[in-house]
Amino acid sequence: MTSERSLFDAYREWRRLAKACQKAISRRNWAFLSECQNAIKKLQPSITAITQQVRDQWKRSQVDHTAKENQLRTTILELMALLESNKKLLQAARAVAISKREELEITGRRLKRIQGSYSLAQPSAWTSLS
């Protein structure tokens, strides 16, 4: 397998993982999201190394260097758009969670007030006469 093919395969894997992140966010599956993000983190160093190898190969060979760089740039831009979409989904999910937490805090305070108004008075120390 050529380095160029390895590079584009790695970017396809990153795209697959980014789409899996999208599903995890939509389903609020935070454990799976974390797994996907960890897999992406492990993939990134190899992409960096392979990218440099591929660029060196392009410079040494007779390929259209500009066309290859444009192909790589297009791949990266598509991935960046997907990552930005995931970021927006995550921000929206976070906003919903914060809103629900605030609602629950308000409800908790109301329940404490109601509970306080219905609590029984302290029982008398004298419960019987001897």
Image (cartoon, rainbow, N blue to C red):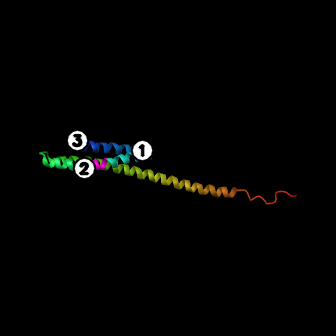
> Which secondary structure is most common in the magenta stretch?
helix
Instruction: Determine the CA span between mark 2 and mark 3.
Output: 14 Å
Q: Nearer the viewer, residue 75 or 6?
A: 6
Residue type pointed to by label 2: Ala
Looking at the rendering, the stretch of residues picked out in magenta corresponds to: 43-47
Q: Residues within 10 Å of mark 3 (few under 14, many from 20)?
A: few
Tell me the residue that label 2 is attached to: 49
Label 3 and label 1: CA atoms lie apart by 28 Å
The answer to whether any part of residue 35 appears in the image is yes
- The number of numbered badges drawn on the structure is 3
Residue 69 appears in the rendering: no
The image shows residue 42 at horizontal and vertical percentages of: 33, 48
First in sequence: mark 2 or mark 1? 1
For the residues labelled 2 and 1, the Cα–Cα distance comes to 27 Å
Sequence order check, earlier mark of 2 and 3: 3
Residue at 37% x, 51% y: name it: 87
Are dots 2 and 1 in contact, CB under 8 Å? no
Q: Nearer the viewer, mark 2 or mark 1?
A: 2
Find residue 130 and report its image quarter. bottom right
Question: Residue 45: where, in percent of width, then height?
Answer: 29, 50
- The disc, 3 or 1, on the residue closer to the chain's N-terminal end is 3
Q: Element under label 3?
A: helix
The single residue placed furthest to the bottom in the displayed view is 125
- Residue occupying image coordinates x 65% and y 56%: 114
Q: What mark, if any, has residue 5 been given in the picture?
A: 3
Q: Which residue is mark 1?
A: 32
Q: What's the amino acid at mark 3?
A: Arg
Residue lying furthest right in this view?
130
Residue found at the far top of this picture: 1
Residue at the spot 40% in from the left edge and 49% down from the top edge: 89
